[in-house]
Image (tube, coloured by chain):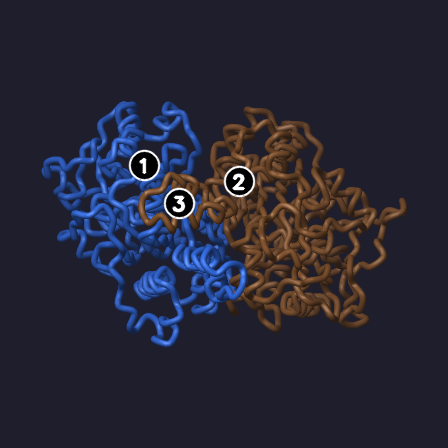
Chain colours: A brown, B blue
């Protein structure tokens, strides 16, 4: 399918720590980042979360940026991850001037909005706090992150709830294939907010214990936060720059379940089509897939739908699969990128992240990775990984990363 | 193509007899939903969702497409009314007893997903939310995928609602705005080898630029292709000065058109600009009220009679993000 798309850099921040190395260490040692709330000002401290350890002022200090202490956590997270990705790929200022930045977010600057909303709303006239609501929209976050990194030629934002980052990567890949740009920094950033913590709580899909994706008794989501970006580029550009190629983005697809705004269908039509079409693009058969990093939120609905879709493709001979949301929490709009980086690390290091928290699998043939494969030095070869991201509204996307081989 | 705005909804009455507003803020004129949305469903939808369904279904009805391959949506603020209500409840009643429906219909992709659910479309579905280039991002996505053959066609729309509270806020957050209103625009983009008689116009190209140098921006324009520029002028110097910098720097004198004087400012305004330019190409004439000097004021009407072949729609969002959409007439010269 035309131009090949290569991954040449990645950056990540989540409850597992800052950077790819910290993330890898946590994954290999099966240490979850989920714990009690520390930073978010909410009364709902009964819910465990995957919060990034650093406070806003600590992040601002790390980055030497002067954002007001109270806000724009999404932007701070985004800058940390984007800087790592750009550094990892060795992009110069000139490279960035010819590159696009595509950010996935839904929360955007909502953290700042919810702090100032009451005073602005109650004043009923013009309040000086009005200006604080400037950052409410998603695009602001993207511009602020991009401008901190360099002078990108184009910046835009995808916002499809929990598949936002995956869709940012898909748009980036399509832009490269069309020859519009050679390099795209794509991913997503999302901070925890009272808005969506309360929103998910109103839907009664938050678990008061640590989440247990794919468990028979799973009871919902632990929300998380973070940011991750990958640098994708054309073959020509990667060769001209002489950089290491981490993997190939060999297939991807975006489909719609078209079933319900917040529930997913029983037969998993959207997820099924996403995985199927992504494999078709990569000219891959189901047997080629070695590992699936599932969306696996831990809600009864999502995990049943996702498994139904997987059974439609693989019958009961499922590839190894796991959800890493019990490590990071559900990082919503950032999850597609955070889990892409997890997949890239798994491929590079030859291990499969375990599905923490699992007690009783749904049935014996649908057992996610429990004792991590490829830990303790016995690396396994992972050729092709499927990374699923499903959002509200049935916005379902699949990315497939493949081990790089020069001739294909 | 269809629009809901402060002009007569689902109509092109604005072309020859636009509604004029004295106020600096006007809500959209709500469309008649009968025949487009079931009453039982309409009751459960917020305004932006009703408008989106009305424009989308009207646009689909005027094309030969029932099930678009892709549904690609732009929205700067998403379902603002529901988000606002949720925030009000959160600040008044605290973090308990919040209504799930408000949250369920508060995300940006609620809009595009709703259309997919109604049409039972399992194809490509994406939503862009990047200030005043949300629509152009959606259009760029559609244009790239239709050209590559990934999609045969797509429903492309952009939708923004501006509540009275947000209008108040925008006075501080968007000093470049002038007359503020709301917009919902839907259009069907189809890939063809050659134009069809039923087509409204051809989309020649879509470009989005972030903080371009004025010199780089100028290089994008030439007298042959860009003699007619539809600009996002609104009469406010904070906004219009960016356009005059451009028009003064290019080495020819384009004829300038405006549309925000009747449709207003909001994040989805560029979608109305593209819609209005397409209408001009379809009708083969320029309404007098759309001609403008680069100060955003009306100019003399002599040029309005000429038969426009191409219109380049240029918008910027607070000077940082620019879009250039080139449209071409499909009517014989």
The answer to whether B186 appears left or right of B280 in the picture is right
Q: Subunit of mark 2?
A: A
Q: Are marks 1 and 2 in contact (CB under 8 Å)?
A: no
Q: Position of residue A358 (x, y in %)?
A: 78, 63
Q: Residues within 10 Å of mark 2 (few under 14, many from 20)?
A: some
* Residue at mark 2: A71
Q: Position of residue A140 (x, y in %)?
A: 46, 40
The answer to whether A302 appears left or right of B131 in the picture is right
Label 1: element kind = loop
What residue is drawn where x is 68% and y is 28%? A242
Q: Position of residue A306 (x, y in %)?
A: 66, 65
Q: Kindly report which numbered mark, 3 or 2, lies closer to the viewer in this rendering.
A: 2
Q: Is residue A319 in view from this perspective? A: yes
Which numbered tag is attached to residue B136?
Answer: 3
Label 3, label 1: how far apart the Cα atoms are: 22 Å
Label 3: element kind = helix
* Residue at mark 1: B175
Between B326 and A217, which is closer to the camera in this rendering?
A: A217
């Amino acid at each position: 399918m035309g131009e090949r798309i290569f991954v040449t850099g990645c950056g990540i921040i989540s409850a597992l720590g800052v950077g790819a190395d910290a993330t890898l260490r946590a994954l290999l040692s099966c240490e979850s980042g989920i714990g009690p709330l520390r930073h978010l000002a909410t009364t709902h401290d009964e819910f465990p979360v995957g919060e990034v350890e650093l406070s806003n002022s600590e992040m601002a200090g790390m980055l030497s940026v002067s954002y007001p202490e109270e806000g724009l956590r999404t932007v701070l997270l985004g800058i940390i991850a984007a800087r790592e990705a750009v550094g990892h790929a060795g992009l110069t200022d000139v490279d960035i001037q010819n590159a696009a930045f595509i950010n996935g977010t839904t929360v955007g600057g909502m953290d700042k909005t919810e702090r100032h909303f009451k005073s602005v709303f109650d004043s009923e006239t013009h309040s000086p706090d009005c200006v604080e609501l400037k950052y409410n929209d998603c695009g602001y976050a993207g511009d602020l992150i991009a401008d901190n990194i360099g002078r990108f030629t184009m910046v835009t934002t995808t916002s499809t709830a929990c598949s936002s980052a995956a869709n940012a990567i898909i748009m980036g890949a399509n832009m490269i294939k069309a020859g519009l740009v050679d390099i795209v920094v794509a991913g997503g950033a999302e901070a925890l907010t009272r808005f969506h913590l309360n929103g998910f709580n109103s839907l009664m899909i938050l678990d008061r214990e640590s989440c247990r994706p794919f468990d028979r008794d799973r009871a919902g989501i632990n929300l998380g936060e973070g940011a991750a970006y990958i640098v994708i580029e054309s073959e020509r550009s990667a060769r001209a720059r002489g950089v290491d190629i981490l993997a190939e983005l060999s297939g991807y697809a975006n489909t719609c379940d078209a079933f319900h705004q917040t529930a997913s269908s029983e037969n998993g039509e959207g997820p099924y089509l996403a995985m199927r079409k992504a494999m078709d693009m990569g000219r891959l058969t189901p047997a080629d897939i070695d590992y699936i990093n599932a969306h696996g939120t831990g809600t009864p609905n999502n995990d049943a739908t996702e498994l139904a879709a997987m059974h439609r493709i693989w019958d009961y001979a499922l590839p190894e699969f796991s959800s890493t949301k019990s490590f990071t929490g559900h990082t919503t709009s950032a999850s597609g990128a955070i889990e892409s980086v997890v997949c890239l690390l798994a491929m590079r290091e030859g291990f499969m992240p375990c599905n923490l928290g699992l007690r009783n699998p749904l049935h014996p043939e649908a057992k996610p990775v429990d004792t991590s494969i490829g830990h303790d030095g016995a690396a396994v070869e992972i050729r092709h990984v499927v990374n699923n991201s499903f959002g509200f509204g049935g916005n379902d996307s699949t990315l497939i990363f493949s081990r790089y081989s020069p001739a294909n | 193509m269809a629009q809901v705005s402060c002009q007569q909804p689902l109509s092109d009455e604005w072309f020859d007899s636009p509604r004029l507003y004295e106020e600096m803020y006007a809500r959209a004129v709500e469309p008649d939903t009968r025949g487009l949305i079931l009453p039982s469903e309409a009751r459960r939808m917020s305004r932006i969702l009703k408008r989106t369904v009305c424009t989308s279904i009207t646009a689909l009805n005027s094309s030969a497409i029932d099930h678009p391959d892709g549904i690609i949506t732009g929205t700067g603020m998403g379902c603002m009314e529901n988000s606002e209500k949720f925030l009000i409840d959160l600040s008044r009643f605290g973090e308990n007893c919040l209504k799930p429906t408000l949250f369920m219909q508060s995300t940006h992709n609620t809009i595009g997903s709703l259309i997919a659910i109604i049409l039972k479309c399992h194809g490509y579905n994406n939503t862009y939310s990047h200030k005043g280039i949300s629509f152009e991002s959606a259009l760029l996505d559609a244009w790239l995928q239709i050209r590559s053959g990934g999609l045969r066609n797509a429903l492309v729309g952009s939708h923004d609602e501006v509540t009275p509270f947000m209008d108040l806020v925008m006075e501080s957050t968007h000093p470049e705005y002038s007359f503020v209103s709301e917009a919902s625009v839907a259009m069907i983009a189809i890939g063809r080898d050659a134009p069809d008689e039923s087509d409204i116009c051809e989309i020649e190209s879509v470009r989005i630029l972030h903080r371009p140098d004025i010199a780089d921006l100028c290089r994008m324009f030439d007298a042959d292709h860009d003699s007619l520029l539809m600009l996002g002028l609104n009469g406010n110097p904070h906004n219009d000065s960016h356009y005059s910098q451009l028009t003064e720097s290019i080495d020819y004198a384009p004829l300038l058109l405006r549309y925000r004087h009747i449709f207003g400012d909001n994040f989805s305004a560029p979608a109305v600009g593209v819609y209005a330019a397409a209408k001009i190409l379809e009708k083969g004439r320029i309404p007098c009220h759309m001609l403008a000097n680069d100060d955003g004021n009306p100019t003399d009407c002599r040029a309005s009679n000429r038969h426009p072949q191409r219109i380049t729609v240029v918008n910027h969002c607070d000077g940082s993000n620019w879009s250039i959409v080139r449209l071409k007439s499909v009517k014989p010269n």
